[in-house]
Image (cartoon, rainbow, N blue to C red):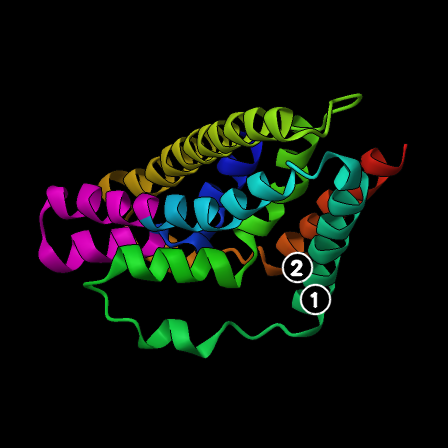
Amino acid sequence: MGAGIYHGLNPGMGWPLAVSAALMEKRRSALWGALAALALGHFLAMLAILLPFSILTTLVEWQSEIRITAGLLVIALGIYLLITRRHPRFLARVPPSRLALWSFLAAMAHGAGLMLVPIYLGICGQSGVDAGHGAAGMLMAGNAGTALLVAIVHTLAMALAGSVLAGLMYFWLGLKFLTKAWFNLDVVWALSLIVVGAIGVATAVI
């Protein structure tokens, strides 16, 4: 939930686009429709990352190695985003009418789903589990359900936080406030990836 709120507050996840859609179309329903599309794209991006890892966690005997590798991937992405500060150019080519697609691609490009992997693997960590086929099947089913639950809770928190900001901008503060008080979380975002990855590695090793 905390990661979801953090993603929702980050303008890079798209809530300014919802404000823009409502202002251009001059109707409130456009705001909520755009926010719903952004949430859908974000949710699909979370599942696209988490579901493959739910299958990997059936390899109980390799769970520590998988968690360490996932943590190192998140750290590497955070370092990359610190060095490369430009936003992916392909995001600018996605038309405004395809907000769900834009949200999906933005979440994937910024590592939003990857950020959840160490958290998710920590939730699903197992010890002393029989690695036989029957136990592996039960574990896979349980972890797939957990992956779905994590994606749902995360997306709901993200959508709520983004909706609060978008609503404030559209109904009360206005576009002038948005242009003057714009904030950029790129560096904070990259550092948070490194921190989450480091925590994931540390909890797998300890």
Report x, y in % for residue 178: 37, 54
Earlier sequence position, callout 2 versus callout 1: 1
Q: What residue type is labelled 2?
A: Val
Q: Mark 2 points at which residue?
A: 187
Residue at image coords 32%, 77%: 93
Q: In which quarter of the image is the C terminus?
A: top right
Tell me if I can see residue 106 in this picture. yes
**173 or 84, which lies in front?**
84
Report x, y in % for residue 141: 50, 28
Left or right of 77: which side holds 7?
left
Tell me if I can see residue 181 in this picture. no
CA gap, disc 2 and disc 1: 6 Å
Residue 20 numbered mark, or none? none
Residue at image coords 25%, 48%: 37
Q: Is the magenta stretch mostly helix, strand or loop?
A: helix
Badge 2: few (under 14), some or many (20 or more) residues near its Cα, within 10 Å? some
Residue at image coords 20%, 56%: 21
Residue 82 numbered mark, or none? 1
Q: What residue type is labelled 1?
A: Leu
Residue at image coords 35%, 50%: 15
Determine whether the residue tagged by mark 1 lies in a helix, strand or loop.
Answer: helix
**Front: mark 2 or 1:** 1
- Report the span colored magenta: 16-40
Determine contact: label 2, label 1, CB under 8 Å.
Answer: yes
Question: Above or below — where is 123 with respect to 102?
Answer: above
